[in-house]
Image: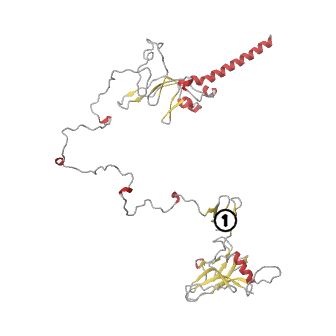
Amino acid sequence: MTITSYPFDSQSITETDYSRLFREFQSTGVADTVGGSAFYAYADGTGMTVKVSPGFAIIRGHAVYSTATESLTITASASSARIDRVVLRLDPAANSITLAVLTGTAGSGVAPTLTQTDTGTYEFPLATVAVGANVTSISAASMTAERKFIGSTVGGWTTTTRPTSPRVGRLGLNLTTNVWEYWDGTAWKDMAPAVSWSTVTGKPTTFAPATHTHLWADITDKPSTFTPAAHTTDWSTIVNEPTTYPPSTHSHTWSSITSKPSTFTPASHTHSSYLESGDTISWANGSKKPYSNTATDGTWYAVWVEGSGTFCRNTSARKFKENIQDFEINPDDVLKMRPVIYDRKDQVDEETGELRPGRKGEVGLIADEVDEIGLKWLVQYMDGEIDALRYDLLGVALLPVVQRQAQQLADLEGRLAVLEAAKS
């Protein structure tokens, strides 16, 4: 019969049949992580012996399992060196897999050939042994590993359910991330990670274009005119030169101007009722001479000075505002403000170098302390640093203090009225 199928009940199956079946499930090799200790052949300089660690392996569909370190004797060489081979030998006739040493040819630098038949003897290499001439022991450096490791099956899992201690090279599809990943011995790695230009290594810093040409019509953003390169022309060759040369429009830095006056008297001018952008302001009636003038005639405004020096009216009517909401002020924070008396620091005029003494004995608040209290809306900043205070808003800050005290007085008056009524 040319067709055989198995295994079925009451059927006689040979080890060759099972070998063919099992080797389809797993390839020949050591069952361990790559570089692991299973069936690891090594030497430690103890005489003419090599040792093989315990482990599990599959040899052409047959399993072999060792629970202890085995020691193998290496035949001493004479005057010529050779290369031996340590193998796991499958012998179907003896129904066994055993460790064996294949002795090499003296004077040859090639390891002995392996016997690897399909149904008979099959030798699986573990390591080669360099046997020196007249040596009495095998050193660790004489060993060269040859083990192959069995593959890992392809799996499917989620990030939560994937294997926790897989062999190196374990491959599977992660259904949580929808990527193929593999175990590198330390962590799960994406088989096809996204690559950005910054992660590409070994790229050149510049990309010199190959020699090529462009059609004039293909060039974009070309100038409409072409300024000539730097050159000189003899005066005698210039024709139609003008008799005079008015200076072209240009500018000068202030420091380059000589004989400039030290003061600049303003020309006669007037200002409209309202200041506009760029206007300056004259002394206001009632401020330059407070004891001889009054500010009762006409309309007067409080003003703000912007950081640019521009003056503007301080308006407060509802028609100028939107998004009006209650603003909560903590009276206790207001009461933490500390009135102080201080001296202004002396200043040096940047242009003249003259020392200008600061005012002494001024009374006010320290903007930094108000900022630390938390009343930042009273603090003004310049170039990202604390600069000044909105003294015009101190009245607003004091309102909740007065309102709380008024409420406390009303409560006390009510309690007093109840006490007096109880006495009568």
Side of 131 relative to 221 (left or right): right
Residue 108 at least partly seen: yes
Side of 215 relative to 297 (left or right): left
Residue placed at 62% from the left, 83% from the top?
85
Residue 339 at least partly seen: no
Count numbered badges in the picture: 1
Side of 250 relative to 65 (left or right): left
Q: Position of residue 329 (x, y in %)?
A: 62, 28
Q: Residue furthest right?
A: 10
Q: Residues within 10 Å of mark 1 (few under 14, many from 20)?
A: many
Residue placed at 48% from the left, 16% from the top?
299
Q: Position of residue 283 (x, y in %)?
A: 41, 19
As rendered, which of 171 and 175 lies closer to the eye?
175
Give the residue at mark 1. Answer: 172
Residue placed at 69% from the left, 20% from the top?
408
Q: Position of residue 39 (x, y in %)?
A: 67, 76
Q: Position of residue 333 (x, y in %)?
A: 62, 28
* Quadrant that contains the C terminus: top right
As rendered, which of 180 and 205 lies closer to the eye?
180
Classify mark 1: helix, strand or loop: strand
* Amino acid identity at mark 1: Gly
Q: Is residue 118 above or below residue 335?
A: below
Q: Is residue 92 above or below residue 24?
A: below
Q: Which color mode does the image show? A: secondary structure
- When asked about the image quadrant of residue 176, the answer is bottom right
